[in-house]
Amino acid sequence: MAFQKEIVVSHDDLDDLNHVNNVRYVQWIQDISKEHWQTVATAKMQQDVIWVVLTHHIEYKRAAVLDDPIVISTHIESSSGAKCVRIVEMKHGKTNKLLVRSSTEWCLLNSKSYRPVRIPEEIKEIFL
């Protein structure tokens, strides 16, 4: 179940080379992941559990520059135990060329104890 949004590169997104800064890409990866969770998870799910990042793997394919439209999409690729792998892709909004692809391993935690918990079936069902 993919989730997506479109953004436009602003001056604040750029680095010294006038390309989107790598740190901004990481922020966008985290932002769309959080937005996806908040959009599809119930209020109870959001109250009971939280997600934390274990690893990020990011491939930078092409540079984005000022005023480029970017379509960001995300989906869960797999899950096992307390962990899942979330894919995020960013494509140029006009050419559809891949700019960035990331694979992030997330761990589900109990929101009170911060201990890992197995991903329940009701959460898997809304993402897979």
Image (cartoon, rainbow, N blue to C red):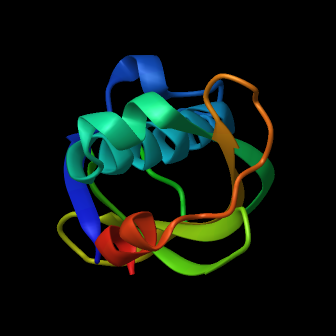
Q: Picture coordinates of residue 50 (x, y %)?
A: 57, 36
Residue at coordinates 22% horizontally, 45% vertically from top-left? 39
Point 71% across, 53% down: residue: 117
| Quadrant assignment, res 87 | bottom right
In the depicted structure, whether residue 81 falls above or below residue 33: below
The residue at the far top in this view is: 12
Does any portion of residue 60 appear in the rendered image? no
All told, the count of numbered labels is 0
| Residue for point 32% across, 51% down | 36
Q: Residue 120 at x, y = what percent?
A: 52, 65
Specify the quadrant that holds the N terminus. Answer: bottom left
- Side of 48 where 39 appears, left or right: left
Question: Is 103 placed above or below 32 here?
Answer: below
Quarter of the image where the C terminus is located: bottom left
Left or right for 27, reference 71? right
| Residue 128 seen from this side | yes
* Front residue of this view, candidates 117 and 23: 117
Picture layout, residue 104 above or below residue 65? below
| Residue pictured at 37% horizontal, 48% vertical | 37
Quick one: 16 or 75, which is closer to the camera? Answer: 75
Instruction: Determine whether 88 is above or below 107 in the image.
Output: below
Left or right of residue 23, residue 74 in this image? left
Residue 27 falls left or right of residue 45: right
Q: Position of residue 108 (x, y in %)?
A: 65, 50
What is the quadrant of residue 45 in the picture?
top left
Nearest the eye: 3 or 109: 109
The percent coordinates of residue 98 (x first, y second) are 44, 75
